Image: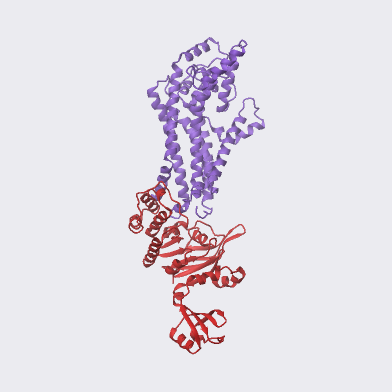
Amino acid sequence: MSKAFLTLIKRIVVETRFFLGFSLLALFALSWFSIYRTSLSEGRAETLAVREMAQRGELAKPAPKKSDESKKDEASPKAESSSATKPEASPPGDAVARSEPAKDEPKKADGEETASAETKSAGEAAPQPALTEEQRRQRRARGFYQFLGGPDMDMSSGAIATMLLYFLTVGIPIMLPLFWGISRGSAAVAAEIERGTMDMILSRPVSRSAYLLAHVITAVFGYLLMVVVIVAGAKIGESFHSVDSSPRMIALARPALNVVGLGLATYGLTIMFSAFDIVRWRPNMIASILTIAQLVGYAVANQPETADDSWYKVPGKFSVFSTFYPIEAFVKGEYLPRHMGALLGVFAAGVIVALWRFNRRDLPANS
Amino acid sequence: MESIIATHQLTKKYGDFYALRNLSLEIHRGEVFGLLGPNGSGKTTTIRTILGMIRATEGFASVAGLDCWNDSLAVRERVSYLPGELRMFGYLSGYQHLKFLCELRGGAGLERAVHIAENIMELDLNRKVRRYSTGMKQKLALAQAFADPVEILILDEPTSALDPSARGLVLDLVMTAKAQGQTVIFSGHVLSEVERISDRVAIMRRGQLMHVEDMHSRRCARMVLARFDEEPPTEFPDDLGLIVRRRDGREILFEHQGEIRSLLDWFSRQGISEIAIGTEDLRGLYDKFHGPDVRDEELAPLVQSARS
């Protein structure tokens, strides 16, 4: 690598140090938190009680036997919250497992699982006596109080707690790589032109390809660091909070790789739009809309009641989220190469188009 | 003279708009070449095409025989460029900024850049660039440009944000660069500066080359304003080298190149009541193409002449 190329990479790292640093710290903390949360679930009385209820067949749908895989899953940042509808990944003792569906139920979107858990929790409970208006009012008030984090808030049960956990352990770890991808992709060309610093760099003997690849390498480097901190957060958290079955390093790395694969695919799309543009907001907006549309399309396509030949299944085929299976990647591992191949394919295609376009385009004055 | 930069029928179109039209130009090695013209006349487009930042719609540009688009990297190894509108990385200090740009050229020229910035431009290189004024940023960029070990310097409005004394320093640095054998393209709006340092000047209008003036010949030329006692003659002896620039009754403005003694002898025999001799600044030439009453159709023959 030439000195100029390394200088470009160094400059981009310096520019992004705060964003990247914050993302890495957040991912590390959340990974640690997921271990802590798993550790709490395994030891608490409610968990044991539910486990016993399941064994006595008092739950509407019995939890499956605890397998090695499900033990691993308990230690996963994503597995715990998503395991509600994953037969192979369900922590049997956790209250969340009360919403376990039948094994033959179609696989659902991660976001949908939580909502499903909420519905089923209510639906599976024993017939309730009619409540008085006062009881209903008190229940609403208590629920609101719990939502705000009141002292009797029960993190092991209840839809709100599940939602919160889901958001912390799955939502944010997905969002951060997506933000990183969109931010760095749009910064590569459009933002540099908009800021007016492209002239200064490309009037030096630096090829356009080298310039763009420096951006790509820095983004990929950021993603690799994310994988490292997710794994490190879980492993270090484990030394402070014991869990029943310690997952192997590779088992932890798989879901992390799947998450950053999704981020890389988003980065590829964003840098492609960025290479055509001269202002940052437009590739940002297009990439954000496209990402949200893919997420919505994926959710629509994966509704459990939707027939396989329905038109509603079509959007899912065009969504990169269709390759997003961190739980399966964690538990089985077999999905990962295929899914990562698809995600990396989108990333590579985006970068190739960006290189092609950037090498042929005019750079406007004062860019 | 050997040409180091050449354009041939260079044209750049944006839709129906011609940013450059059939620009054919040669810039000689070691000369200071002035580019003049109002905003939108095509100066910056010409420069950016030479740097390979813009792809010509038709025609070509070359630097030292290298195609400016296809061999852009090799071209930029030979060229240092000061953009007209400066944008810098505000989070870097002045020194870090110079170091960053030098490292993009393999690390060459840092010592000289620091020397120019600190000792000639009197900049504090430890300050963050974001705390620099516009003029200080311009000085920093100039220090970088003049320090680069290259054959060609392209300066796009290099004195626009500078105080008068700093402007003088820049002109001195241009002359030093010329003395060291560098070729300088100096694009600007301050005619007196361009006039002072340029060997040749190109005047552009609406993407077209209107005129190329040899400044050495121009400096030798003089303007003579004569008021005749009687009706002046309509024709003048060829060997005097007189060209009538303006006739207003008994008053005639001549452009003259040649022996002054024979001219004065001739005038003494003509019955002259008043005579004033001086030089014409670049303004007169510039106004020929950009004066308030100039129309495009009047300039068409001049464009043809400049092309040929």
| Figure colour scheme | by chain
Q: Along the line of sight, which residue is nearer the eye, A244 or B139? A: B139
Residue B100 vertical position relative to residue B58 in the rendered view, above or below: above
Q: Residue furthest bottom?
A: B269
Colour-to-chain, purple? A
User: Taking the image as drawn, is residue A7 in sight?
Assistant: yes
Relative placement, left or right, of B294 versus B202 is right
Locate residue A47, reporting x and y percent: 48, 15
Please indicate whether residue A50 sits to the left or right of residue A243 in the image: right
Q: Nearer the viewer, residue B20 or A124?
A: B20
> Can you name the residue that lies furthest to the right here?
A310
For the colour red, the matching chain is: B
Question: At 43% from the left edge and 35% from the top edge, which residue is drawn?
Answer: A22
Residue B280 at what x, y percent from top left?
Answer: 48, 74
Whole-percent x, y for residue A314 in the image = 63, 34
Is residue A349 visible from the viewing direction of this image? no
| In the image: residue A241, left or right of residue A67 | left
Looking at the image, is A298 positioned above or below residue A140? below
Across and down, in percent, residue B263 comes to 47, 85
Quadrant position of residue A129: top right
Number of marks in picture: 0
Residue closer to the observer: A347 or B61: B61
